[in-house]
């Protein structure tokens, strides 16, 4: 009974926090709600017996990603009026995409059927906790059965990181930058001057 109540508590708070992330008007408040959602997700992982995943969520997502988001949002001067104008401009396109995704999800769940051997297959990868620790069992599963999916996930994150850098890169023409090709291709007359110096006279 206590386990079920704890699950519903974490799940309810997590769903409410996720809704507040996308509905809050203040970006700083959205990041704080995101941190709360991460903590509740970690609590759900603890209830499932995945303590290692719960620790990763708290250390990586809360301790690094969410805090980085918070610092970036607080340091940036976000123009809320411009964001709202852009939201109104692209609202029809966003609504159309949302309707299409909703129809696809509904069609997916209408044709969903549970295989008879699903329960046995779901319990098969979970080893006995007395034989293997949670961290070792997770590592054996990720780096053997799902190693290609793990590599694809890392590749997707790398592409996303490069795309974010390219989209946010701003070139300031007033900043002087080093051009290696221009430096190497300079003629000798621009970089070398031969002066005839008198003896004991200097230049």
Image: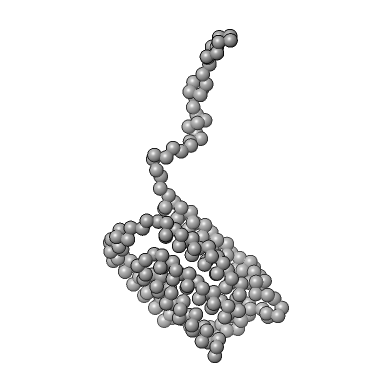
Q: Say which residue appears at 42% left-offset and 59% top-offset.
A: 74
Q: As drawn, which residue projects farthest toward the top?
A: 199
Q: Is residue 200 above or below residue 78?
A: above
Is residue 138 rendered to the left or right of residue 174?
Answer: right
Quarter of the figure with residue 151: bottom right
Residue 141 visible from this viewpoint: no
Q: Which colour scheme is used?
A: one colour
Q: In this view, does 52 lie above or below 190?
A: below
Residue 125 % position (x, y): 63, 77
Q: Quadrant of the N terminus?
A: bottom right
Is residue 12 rendered to the left or right of residue 45?
Answer: left
Q: Say which residue appears at 34% left-offset and 72% top-offset.
A: 99
Q: Say which residue appears at 45% left-offset and 81% top-offset.
A: 12
Quarter of the figure with residue 42: bottom right
Q: Say which residue appears at 36% left-offset and 58% top-offset.
A: 78
**Front one among 21 and 140:** 21
Is residue 57 rendered to the left or right of residue 176?
Answer: right
Q: How many marks?
A: 0
Residue 181 % position (x, y): 50, 34
Residue 35 % position (x, y): 48, 69
């Amino acid at each position: 009974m206590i386990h079920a109540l704890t699950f519903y508590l974490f799940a309810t708070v997590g769903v409410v926090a996720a809704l507040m992330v996308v509905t809050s008007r203040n970006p700083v408040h959205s990041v704080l709600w995101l941190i709360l959602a991460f903590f509740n997700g970690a609590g759900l992982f603890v209830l499932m017996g995945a303590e290692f995943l719960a620790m990763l969520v708290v250390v990586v997502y809360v301790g690094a990603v969410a805090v980085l988001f918070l610092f970036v949002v607080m340091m940036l001067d976000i123009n809320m009026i411009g964001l709202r104008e852009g939201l109104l401009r692209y609202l029809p396109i966003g609504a159309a995409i949302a309707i299409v995704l909703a129809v696809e999800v509904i069609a997916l769940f209408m044709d969903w059927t549970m295989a008879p051997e699903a329960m046995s297959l779901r319990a098969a990868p979970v080893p006995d906790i007395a034989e293997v620790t949670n961290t070792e069992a997770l590592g054996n599963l990720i780096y053997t059965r799902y190693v290609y999916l793990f590599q694809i996930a890392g590749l997707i994150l790398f592409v996303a990181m490069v795309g974010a850098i390219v989209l946010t890169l701003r070139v300031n023409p007033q900043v002087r930058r080093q051009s290696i090709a221009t430096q190497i291709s300079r003629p000798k007359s621009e970089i070398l001057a031969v002066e005839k110096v008198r003896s004991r006279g200097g230049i």
